[in-house]
Amino acid sequence: MGFPANGATTDKPLKFLIYGRTGWIGGLLGELCRAQSIDFEYGSGRLENRPSLEADIAAVSPTHVFNAAGVTGRPNVDWCESHKVETIRTNVVGTLTLADVCRERGLILINYATGCIFEYDGAHSLGSGVGFKEEDSPNFVGSFYSKTKAMVEELLKNYENVCTLRVRMPISSDLTNPRNFITKITRYDKVVDIPNSMTILDELLPISIEMAKRNLTGIWNFTNPGVVSHNEILEMYRQFIDPSFSWKNFTLEEQAKVIVAPRSNNELDASKLKEEFPDMMPIKEALVKFVFEPNKKKTAAA
């Protein structure tokens, strides 16, 4: 195989092949590559079409492949409940095909996956500070989206060339983006209030590029350490962005009446990632530094 041992580095000039050009994370990855002067191209093939992936790799000759493509549903994961075949085609068939093609060619695949495959349970109770680790088996199958993601993660464990990043409730400094977790909850009529692990993309996406440079593989909880609740985020939003902002809470039982599929709530243990990247900030500090402080300056300037 062409890929070196986990954690090895290479002196070969970087060339990234990125899938998910029209997606949020895929777009941000391209911006980061430009900023770091990393040579990259977006894949034009469809994930479930093996010959098109093989053609992309032959044309680009990448050192690493990034998969930021996938079906999450529009406007939310409830879409997947009524579009199961389409969800399987991309999230299962497509992801496995890309991993297999990459393995055949000795390429590491950085796969942006999800941590929404767990829910608080007796051994990992809400408020306990005990998070799910990388080796824990998924225990949340409430939504079809999460079910497909859990299936794929289990199968990808057999591919030694794959780096699986468990992203959760992603947040960025772009508060106009409708995919941003903060933007979503500021627009909801009512929100639940449950502490969760979350991913601050402004801090963690550059880390994922560094992970590629280090040729890291295996499963990684890709969240900032600790948890933060909906209300805590909205309180920060009111403090930094809009002093007149208000919101209403409702219970999980009340939420269940207005959604099709249950949602995942959990804490992931980020100590493996923290050990590899000691400067990574706890979630609440990262929210202030990467999201709210920059937006406060923009608001003040406006």
Image (spheres, grey):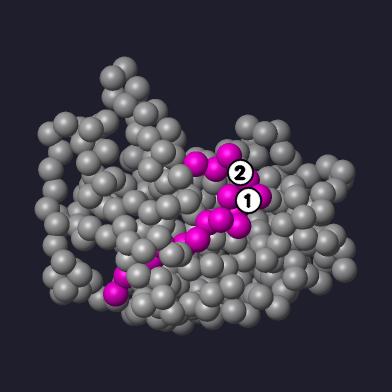
Check the image and report above or below for 113 versus 14: below
> As drawn, is 266 to the left or to the right of 7?
left
Give residue 41's position: percent from left, percent from top. 69, 48
Magenta span of residues: 262-281
Q: Which residue is mark 2?
A: 278
Q: Quadrant of residue 297?
A: top left
Q: Is residue 258 at least partly visible in the picture?
A: no
Label 1 sits on residue: 275
Q: Residue furthest top?
A: 301
Labelled disc at residue 78: none
Who's the residue at 36% across and 77% down the image?
Answer: 122
Determine contact: label 2, label 1, CB under 8 Å: yes
Amino acid type of the residue tagged 2 in the rendering: Pro
Q: Main secondary structure of the magenta part?
A: loop
Q: Residue at x 63, y 80 (%)?
A: 155
Depth check: give the residue in front, 148 or 124. 124
| Residue 206 shown left or right of residue 101 in the figure | left
Query: Which percent across, then down, holds residue 302?
Result: 28, 19
Number of other residues with Cα within 10 Å of mark 1, as a class: few under 14, some 14 to 19, many 20 or more: few
